[in-house]
Image (spheres, rainbow, N blue to C red):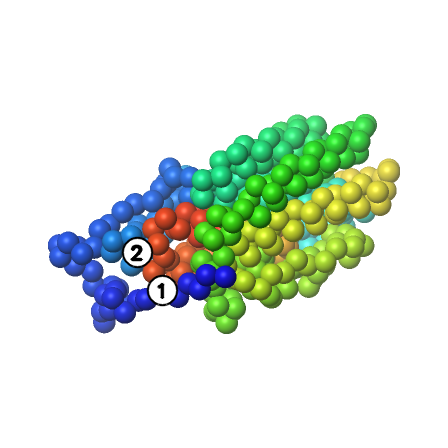
């Protein structure tokens, strides 16, 4: 394994205000922008890089290029009007926002969700996790020049989007999980078509293992690079695969089971390298877990039953005063919604806790000094962030 310990002795020292005193006029340093339109940028964000030769001295994350201000928008809409907004907070994995918002609303309103809907929700979340990981594999491979893997994963992701469209009527923003349950049952023959998608995915993933994970160039470019000291996990709020890649088995599905995860068999994938390769490997193993969970859900789910609880007139829905925090495990770590109600027809306060804020702002800016400029894209992708969660 290649050791990676950046030599920061040559870099400028922070001044009294904590900012680096970089003299761009000296000719020693150069300021570059990576993104927002760049294959190494995981969404509409950019990183302001200060480089010395081919080494990065400083990196600052800039967001706000597209989706923003969702939390305040939610506070100015009725509870049912919030429902189609929340999925925009995370475009590649919208269903988790739907679930967290619905679960927080249900807890404050005292709504009991039917069992069938609980199984359906769990399946939808694992389908969304699968799609998010397809994007990750395509991005991490593309950032290191393996473009064919991205093409394969886009195709497989499209097959799963076909199943989303069949079930929800939409491919990206599904708006299927709403307060009280879900919008419908499985369509006839859905199980067989889903199994066909999973088998195709397994075939392509076997090729990904050969082309990428056993590729000596990929290993040389990722092993030992972008190392995160596990001692920093708590300080920087590192969760999900980024923590599991450092040997910490954090997974809300196991630690605080929700929906029907306590009725499913699965283990938490961990690695010990805490580098780019380990973070990619944990996510690769998580894909196998999601495939297994989808199969288990389809086998164990009730065949009939209601999927929606009785709700009051949603146009005049007032929820009693209270507050709650609902969390779960998305593809990037702990995801949560903090909601406060005041007895009116509008949420008093909604705060979204997405992993991207800590991973892309604090953690990335801590890791990037000393990185070779050619490794910046892979480092960013390995943290797996979605910018709208930051400027929400």
Which residue, as the protein is rendered here, is positioned at the far front? Answer: 216
Q: Is residue 148 visible?
A: yes
Relative image position of residue 24 (x, y in whole percent): 17, 55
- Residue 336 visible, this orientation: no
Total marks drawn?
A: 2
Q: Is residue 127 left or right of residue 374?
A: right
Image x and y of residue 171, in percent: 61, 30
- Nearer-the-camera pick, 224 or 74: 224
- Report x, y in % for residue 233: 51, 67
The answer to whether residue 92 is left or right of residue 46 is right
**Position of residue 307 in the picture relative to residue 317 (left or right):** right
Question: Horizontal and vertical percent for residue 341?
Answer: 58, 55
Relative depth, front residue between 355 and 25: 25
Tell me: residue 311, above or below residue 24: above
Give the residue pinned by disc 2: 55
In the displayed structure, 359 sits above or below 121; it is below
Please give the name of the residue rendered at 58% of the width and 33% of the height, measured from the top-left corner: 152
Mark drawn on residue 6: 1
Image quarter of residue 85? top right
The quarter of the displayed image where residue 300 is located: top right
| Secondary structure of residue under mark 1 | loop
Q: Secondary structure at mark 2?
A: strand
Q: Residue at x 47, y 53 (%)?
A: 220
């Amino acid at each position: 394994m290649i050791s990676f310990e950046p030599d920061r002795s040559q870099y400028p020292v922070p001044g009294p205000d904590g900012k680096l005193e970089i003299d761009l006029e000296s000719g020693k340093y150069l300021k570059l922008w990576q993104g927002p339109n760049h294959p190494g940028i995981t969404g509409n964000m950019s990183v302001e890089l200060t480089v010395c030769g081919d080494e990065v001295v400083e990196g600052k994350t800039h967001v706000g290029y597209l989706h923003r201000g969702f939390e305040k928008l939610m506070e100015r809409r009725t509870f049912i009007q919030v429902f189609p907004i929340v999925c925009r907070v995370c475009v590649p994995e919208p269903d988790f926002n739907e679930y967290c918002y619905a679960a927080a609303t249900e807890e404050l309103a005292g709504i009991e969700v039917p069992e069938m809907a609980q199984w359906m929700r769990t399946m939808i979340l694992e389908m969304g996790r699968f799609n998010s990981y397809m994007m990750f594999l395509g991005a991490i491979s593309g950032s290191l020049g393996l473009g064919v893997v991205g093409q394969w994963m886009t195709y497989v992701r499209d097959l799963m989007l076909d199943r989303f469209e069949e079930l929800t009527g939409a491919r990206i923003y599904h708006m299927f999980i709403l307060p009280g349950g879900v919008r419908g049952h499985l369509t006839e023959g859905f199980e067989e078509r889903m199994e066909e998608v999973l088998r195709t995915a397994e075939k392509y993933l076997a090729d990904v293992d050969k082309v990428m994970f056993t590729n000596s160039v990929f290993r040389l470019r990722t092993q030992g690079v972008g190392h995160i000291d596990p001692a920093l996990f708590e300080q920087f709020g590192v969760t999900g695969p980024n923590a599991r890649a450092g040997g910490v088995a954090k997974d809300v599905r196991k630690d605080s089971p929700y929906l029907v995860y306590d009725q499913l068999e699965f283990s938490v994938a961990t690695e010990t390298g805490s580098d780019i390769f380990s973070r990619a490997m944990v996510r690769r193993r998580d894909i196998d877990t999601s495939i297994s969970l989808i199969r288990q859900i389809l086998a164990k789910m009730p065949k009939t039953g209601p999927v929606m609880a009785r709700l009051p007139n949603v146009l005049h829905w007032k929820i009693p005063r209270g507050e709650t925090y609902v969390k779960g495990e998305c593809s990037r770590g702990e995801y949560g919604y903090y909601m406060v109600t005041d007895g009116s027809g509008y949420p008093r306060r909604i705060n979204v806790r997405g992993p991207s804020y800590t991973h892309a702002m604090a953690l990335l800016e801590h890791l990037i000094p000393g990185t070779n400029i050619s490794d910046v894209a892979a480092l960013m992708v390995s943290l797996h962030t979605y910018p709208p969660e930051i400027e929400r």
